[in-house]
Image: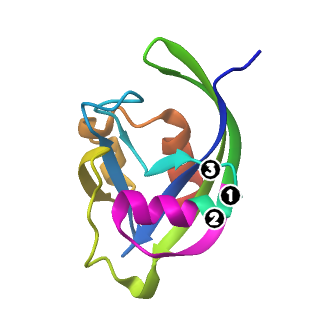
Amino acid sequence: MYPNYRISVEVIVWHDDKVLLTKRAEHCKVAPNVWNVPAGKIKYDEVPVQGLFREAKEELNLDVELIEELFVRNLKSKSGDEDIYRVVFTYLVKPKNNDISLLTLNDEHSEFAWVTKEDLNDCKYETLHDDIRHILVTKVFM
């Protein structure tokens, strides 16, 4: 019934009272040119918390420390013309040793920004998913 069903993680990186947003690259099949937080699918042999560390390293070249699990939700979305179904674990993390000097985006992203709560109102970030915006406003920027 749900052929494209996966478990995914979202990684909210907290540093100097800001969070890291990344813009998906134009060539990406899922959410091209959309601002989001780093995210990805969990591999078969992982549990979500393991996947968050791998995704942070793969997408950002950052080692991170877990602060807390913020939210778990079901998500129905699109990948091209195909419906996708996800259970999404959202984690708040900080850079290990507060070190962002090696931050480098992989090819899934075209740019990044460190943002405050007020920055979320900028029309530049209008593509940010409502769920992420809500999590940031109610659970991170309190």
Q: Judge whether 53 appears above or below 100 on screen.
A: above
The residue depicted at 26 percent of the width and 38 percent of the height is 25
Q: Residue furthest front?
A: 45
Mark 2 highlights which residue?
50
Q: Judge whether 87 appears above or below 92 on screen.
A: above
Q: Position of residue 31 (x, y in %)?
A: 39, 30
Residue 68 within the magenta-colored segment of the rendering = yes
Label 1: element kind: loop
Label 2: element kind: helix
* Contact flag, marks 3 and 1 (Cβ < 8 Å): yes
Q: Nearer the viewer, residue 125 or 79?
A: 79
Q: Label 1: how many residues lie within 10 Å, few (<14), some (14-19) or many (20+)?
A: few
Q: How is the image coloured?
A: rainbow
Label 3: element kind: loop
Q: Label 3: how many residues lie within 10 Å, few (<14), some (14-19) or many (20+)?
A: some
Q: What amino acid type is highlighted by mark number 2?
A: Gln
Q: Nearer the viewer, residue 16 or 45?
A: 45
Mark 1 highlights which residue?
46
* Contact flag, marks 2 and 1 (Cβ < 8 Å): yes
- Using the numbered discs, state the Cα–Cα distance from disc 2 to disc 3 in whole angstroms: 9 Å
- Using the numbered discs, state the Cα–Cα distance from disc 3 to disc 1 in whole angstroms: 5 Å
Mark 3 highlights which residue?
43
Residues drawn in magenta = 52-70
Image quadrant assignment for residue 103: bottom left
Q: Is residue 75 left or right of residue 10?
A: right
- Using the numbered discs, state the Cα–Cα distance from disc 2 to disc 1 in whole angstroms: 6 Å
The residue depicted at 57 percent of the width and 49 percent of the height is 135
